[in-house]
Amino acid sequence: MAVEVVVERGTVDHTPLGDLPERWEACLLPDAVEIASGQVDPREKPYSEMLHVGPEHIEPGTGRLLALTTARETGLISGKYLFTDHDVLYSKIRPYLRKVALPTFTGVCSADMYPLRPKPSLDRRFLFFWLLTDAFTAAIVPSQARTGIPKVNRQQLFATSLPRPPLPEQRAIAAVLRSAQRAQEACERVIAATRQLKTSLMHHLFTYGPVPFGQADRVALRETEIGPMPEQWETVSLGELATFVQYGTSSRCEVGGVGYPVLRIPNVVGGAVDCGELKYLAASPKEVKRHRLEPGDLLFVRTNGVRENVGRCAVYDGEPKEALFASYLIRTRVTAERALPKFVQIFTETNAGRASFFGRASGAADGKFNINSQTIRATMLPLPSISEQCEIARQLAAVDAKLAAEEKRRAALAALFQSLLHYLMTGRVRVTVAEFARGKP
């Protein structure tokens, strides 16, 4: 199907959904959709061998199905709904999560889902995308008066309306939105592949050094407590490289306050400092002198409710200017002649580096995990020459730049999809069907 997207300001009709283009209509959901009734026993064949879909198997906002198993493999015993590839699956639990799916097979679904079957006047993909819109979610979420888990019943669902353009236009709208989704999915695959590349490259660089993959077998290795590494590399403790290790300020800081920006746990992200969500402190000259950061300082997260986040590290690069750091962080400054701060930070992302921190974290009564300055000083790390450290950091920075570019592209594609979803579903942007091919779009 070939479609042309155009902005059209033609005649409009006034409907319960607002102004819609001429020949569009607003209809109640039961006028366009049927809900499956009756349940099947998932312990009996053929249902026991069918794939099972529950709310937990649907990715919010995208419709992707995750890690499905059969009813028998899942051990289901209570009644389930039967669905086919003519249906749209909608989760009635926590509707604000927008868990909607388009199955391509016959299966069974949780009683916490509605199998919706469009009538002949409604395209299945068009219905799928309508259920993802802000307009539908806004209509369905306020109707819940439950004090527990938000849940939509049939009466609430059937009280909502949806736009119904002519069927060819529905299909054209769905085709445009599906193309936008495919672009997002392709971007996600690139990001996943790049992350896997970074993992493989880190393993290679910290095992063989910055040599081409084809020359790895020529590198003489030695075994150490943190794994194999080139035999000419040293193994040192972080304490041997540190000029000092220091806790941050415990003074109360304020959002939007005056004074000096104070870096906290949320600002230590992805190996760098995130300048969002800053708090400020009107610090005394003595406190500023003690806790002001210098470019190249390493910041370690010393406490967290998730063990794997303990020891998360970032390099302060001078932004925000004249920043201080809070008490839940530990600052370490290394000797520049021996260690590159970025190299030390990168090591904390390796398996050996992560294990050195969260593996030694101690649990507290409040459910958090903690490390201290002694943990940081005792952490062992490899120490190649400065030139090798710089090359390792350079190669991984190139991969990080690729990741950052793709993540920026992913955000742009997500924003584009949401804009298209809104404008196409309200008729503010129209698709003109230039040619409609037979079969499903």
Image (cartoon, grey):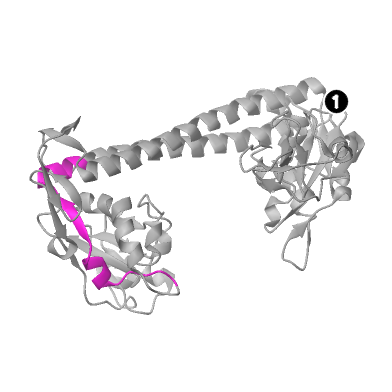
Residue 358 on image: x %, y %: 75, 53
Task: Reply yes or no: does residue 158 show up in magenta.
Answer: yes
Residue placed most toward the observer, 9 or 434: 9
* Amino acid bearing label 1: Ala
Task: Reply yes or no: does residue 272 show up in magenta.
Answer: no
Q: Quadrant of residue 66?
A: bottom left
Residue 389 on image: x %, y %: 76, 26
Along the horizontal axis of the image, is 23 left or right of 260?
A: left
Q: Which residues are magenta?
A: 149-173
Q: Residue at x 86, y 41 (%)?
A: 287
- Please give the residue where the numbered disc 1 appears in the rendered image: 336
Q: Is residue 363 above or below residue 292?
A: below
Residue 111 appearing in the image: yes
Along the horizontal axis of the image, is 338 left or right of 414?
A: right
Along the horizontal axis of the image, is 78 left or right of 410?
A: left
Crowd band around label 1 with a 10 angstrom C-alpha radius: few (<14), some (14–19), many (20+): few
Residue 174 appearing in the image: no
Q: Secondary structure at mark 1?
A: loop
How many marks the image carries: the answer is: 1
